[in-house]
Amino acid sequence: MPAPAHMFAPTYAAQPWWDADSFAVGRFLAEHRDALLRELQPYATGPTAAWRADSGVPYELVEAGAWRQLSLYEESTGWDEAVCAALHATCGHLRRLQASPAGQREMGLKIKLFELGAHAALRPHFGVTNRRIFLHMAVNLPTRGSSYLRVGAEARAFEAAGQRFLFDDSFEHEVWNEGGEPRHVLGIELIHPGAHDSLGAP
């Protein structure tokens, strides 16, 4: 990964896929799946979602179709209160998780919703650091046609709402949607467990 040296931790375990159930945040999403989906699914497809084009990448990431995102939380700006007014239950659950000891240990700098449009694809790319991993939970999937995430050499299909993928985005990865409807995922940045190992945390 051609990242600046200060962004790369050579002692951290390097693997493209992680087990979501081995993290408290992953188990939390499974436990609260129904409540989260009940609110997120209609919001993501409705007219009031605060989508914006992804202008934060330094190169053309979209290979085909449309790609949008919206932030529920970013460390630099905090919780988006306008979004949270529409996603009261979701933000409430996630705020309580963030304030818990497990959340403080595991949760990183951002929580977002991502939309990959019908027949859309993002070019292969990689993150700027290996100090984080990303947890994605499927929110809405196309009714016909599959949506995929490839990390490293392995591609996995999103098969059902509530499905969780946990991956290291410092590995080359790409996504594509073969369906005729958008694919939505909730994305939560997690702190790589190597950060705690390096500090001698239990």
Image: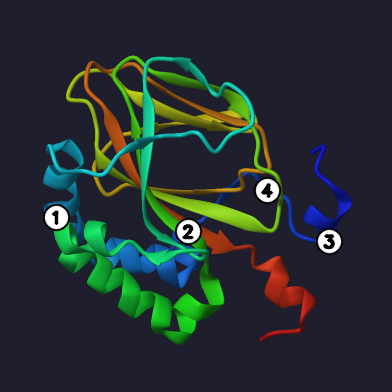
Q: Earlier in the sequence, mark 3 or mark 2?
A: 3
Sequence order check, earlier mark of 2 and 4 = 4
198 sits to left or right of 50:
right
**If the image is split into quadrants, where does the C terminus sit?**
bottom right
Residue 142 image position (x, y, % from top left): 22, 26
**Horizontal and vertical percent position of residue 130:** 71, 52
Residue tagged by mark 3? 11
Q: State the separation of the CA atoms marked 3 and 2.
A: 24 Å
Secondary element type, mark 4: loop
Q: State whether residue 136 is above or below residue 31.
A: above
Task: Say which amino acid is labelled 2.
Answer: Lys
Badge 3 amino acid: Thr
Query: Between tags 1 and 4, which lies in front?
Result: 1
As drawn, is 60 to the left or to the right of 4? Answer: left
Q: Please identify, in this view, whether the residue under mark 3 or under mark 2 is nearer the observer.
A: 2
Q: Which residue is mark 4?
A: 15
Query: How far apart are labels 3 and 4 at the CA level?
Result: 12 Å
- The residues tagged by marks 2 and 4 sit, at their Cα atoms, a distance apart of 21 Å
Q: CA distance from mark 3 to mark 1?
A: 40 Å
Q: Nearer the viewer, residue 167 or 153?
A: 167
Q: Cβ–Cβ below 8 Å for labels 3 and 4?
A: no
> Between tags 3 and 1, which lies in front?
1
Return the x and y of residue 174 as percentages of the image width and height.
54, 27
**Vertical arrangement, residue 181 with respect to residue 64, above or below:** below
- At horizontal 79% and vertical 75% (from top left) the residue drawn is 198
Q: Earlier in the sequence, mark 3 or mark 1?
A: 3
Q: Residue at 61% x, 47% y: name it.
A: 168
Residue at the location (17% across, 25% down)?
Answer: 143
- Give yes or no for contact between labels 3 and 1 (Cβ–Cβ under 8 Å): no
The Cα atoms of the two marked residues, 1 and 4, are separated by: 33 Å
Q: Which mark is residue 39?
A: 1
